[in-house]
Image: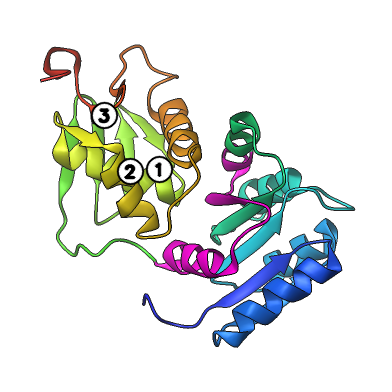
Amino acid sequence: MPNANLRILVIEDNRDLATEIVDFLASGGNTVESALDGITGLHLAVVNDYDAIVLDLMLPGMDGMLLCRKLRQHAGKSTPILMLTARDALEDKVAGLEAGADDYMVKPAELREMEARLKALARRGTTRTANQKLKVGDLTLDQEGRTLYRGETRLDLPRIPYKILELLMERSPQVVRREELEQLIWNNTRPDSDALRAHMHVLRTLIDKPFDKQLLRTIWGVGYQLAVGNEANK
């Protein structure tokens, strides 16, 4: 539910910043818990069920990258993660997403935008109820089961790349403008200039790089297209 209150875990080692985030999110009716180091944060994230996690990249005990990987790969937790980073290079943002974060914000983060991002990440599933299968080339998406295959290979996508891919498959072979993709993901909270590029990099790495034929194309200055070779750029 878009307006439902959330149970949120904040993992941030700067005590003043952690208090500011916790107080702001709690003032909106959310239930908020916090940890000041990575080891405590991982423990809380594993033993409790949260609607979303705010995770600092640089933490004592265990950094945010390792915490993400352990939470996803070892604990099997799919709790949405919004990573906070003081690093603004695209490579650092992509690294966080590839480690298992669902989205990121660069410090200093605007708290109203943070809450909006968390609520968006916490929405489960899609609005569709029909069992519709989308197919582009050898890429097949079952929207009801949220399963994705390229040929015989099962692919698992994070939330935001999944939503992007779903729209691109629905529109294929049309080009989808980047402004429309940004509106789909972040609504009216304008992301930084690297945000969409970072998620597209993760999507391309998962659905294209291990395979012989490229389906995802960047149409420079316009947007993105998902199409087989003879349909591209139509």
* Mark toward the start of the polypeptide (3 vs 1): 1
Q: The disc labelled 2 sits on which kind of residue?
A: Ile
At x 23%, y 25%, the residue is 138
In reply to whether residue 105 is colored magenta, the answer given is: yes
Q: Can residue 43 be spotted in the picture? A: yes
Q: Quadrant of residue 33?
A: bottom right
Give the percent coordinates (x, y) of residue 136.
19, 30
Q: Residue at x 62, y 29 (%)?
A: 91
Q: How many marks?
A: 3
Q: Which residue is mark 3?
A: 222
Give yes or no for contact between labels 3 and 1 (Cβ–Cβ under 8 Å).
Answer: no
Q: Is residue 76 visible?
A: no
Q: Is residue 218 above or below residue 15?
A: above
Mark whose residue sits in front, 3 or 1: 3
Q: Amino acid at mark 1?
A: Pro
* Picture coordinates of residue 13, whole percent (x, y): 83, 61
Marker disc for residue 164: 2
What kind of element bears circle 2?
A: helix
Query: Residue 176 location in percent, x, y?
Result: 22, 36
Q: Give the labeled residue for mark 1.
A: 161
Quarter holding the N terminus is bottom left
Residue 87 on the magenta span = no
Front one among 220 and 211: 220
Mark with earlier residue (3, 2) = 2
Q: Residues within 10 Å of mark 3 (few under 14, many from 20)?
A: few
Q: Secondary structure at mark 3?
A: loop
* Callouts 2 and 1 close, C-beta under 8 Å: yes
Q: Which residues are magenta?
A: 96-123
Distance (Cα) linking label 3 and label 2: 15 Å
